[in-house]
Image (cartoon, rainbow, N blue to C red):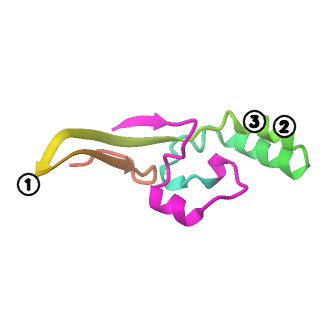
Amino acid sequence: HKLYYSTVHDITNTFQRESVLGKSEKVSWEKSDNRFFWNYHPILPLIERSSSERASGDVEAAEAIDQWIVPVTSAFIETRSHCQIGQNKFDVIFVSRRGCLRPGMRF
């Protein structure tokens, strides 16, 4: 497992969950799944400051803080190219996220 982040896509949620959540007014870190938000506690002061700025009406300050809040997740990613079943050829990408509530070695 390695740590991953994305500045353009929420990698803490599955595509299925994102489709259910749909578009919202929330900024990306607010939509994150806390089960896979590994750096939540270290950046909690930024999250609290952003929330307080937004509550006081200073949206510009909150947005400036929000750009520094980037969720990190622990995952295993593997790709297999040139797979074939019958006449169908395809590539496979396997992604397994590790929840931060149960860290540790897996056997």
Location of residue 93 by image quarter: top left
- What residue is pinned by disc 1? 86
Give, as a three-letter code, the residue at label 3.
Answer: Ile
Q: Which stretch is magenta?
A: 1-30
Foreground pick, 44 / 28 = 28
Rendered residue at 50%/36% (across/down): 5
Q: Is 86 displayed left or right of 30 in the figure?
A: left
- What residue is pinned by disc 3? 65
Rendered residue at 66%/52% (across/down): 30
Residue 61 image offset from top left, x and y in percent: 84, 37
- Residue furthest bottom in the image: 20
Give, as a three-letter code, the residue at label 1.
Answer: Gly
Q: Badge 3: few (under 14), some or many (20 or more) residues near its Cα, within 10 Å?
A: some
Q: Quadrant of the N terminus?
A: top left
Element under disc 3: helix
Foreground pick, 19 / 58 = 19
What label sits on residue 61 in the rendered view?
Answer: 2
Q: Is 45 displayed left or right of 83 in the figure?
A: right
Element under disc 1: loop
CB-based contact (under 8 Å), mark 2 and mark 1? no
Q: Is residue 86 part of the magenta span, yes or no?
A: no
Q: Is residue 21 part of the magenta span, yes or no?
A: yes
Earlier in the chain: of badge 1 and badge 3, it is 3
Q: Distance from label 1 to label 3 (Cα)? A: 52 Å
Residue 8 image offset from top left, x and y in percent: 57, 38
Q: Is 41 displayed left or right of 67 in the figure?
A: left
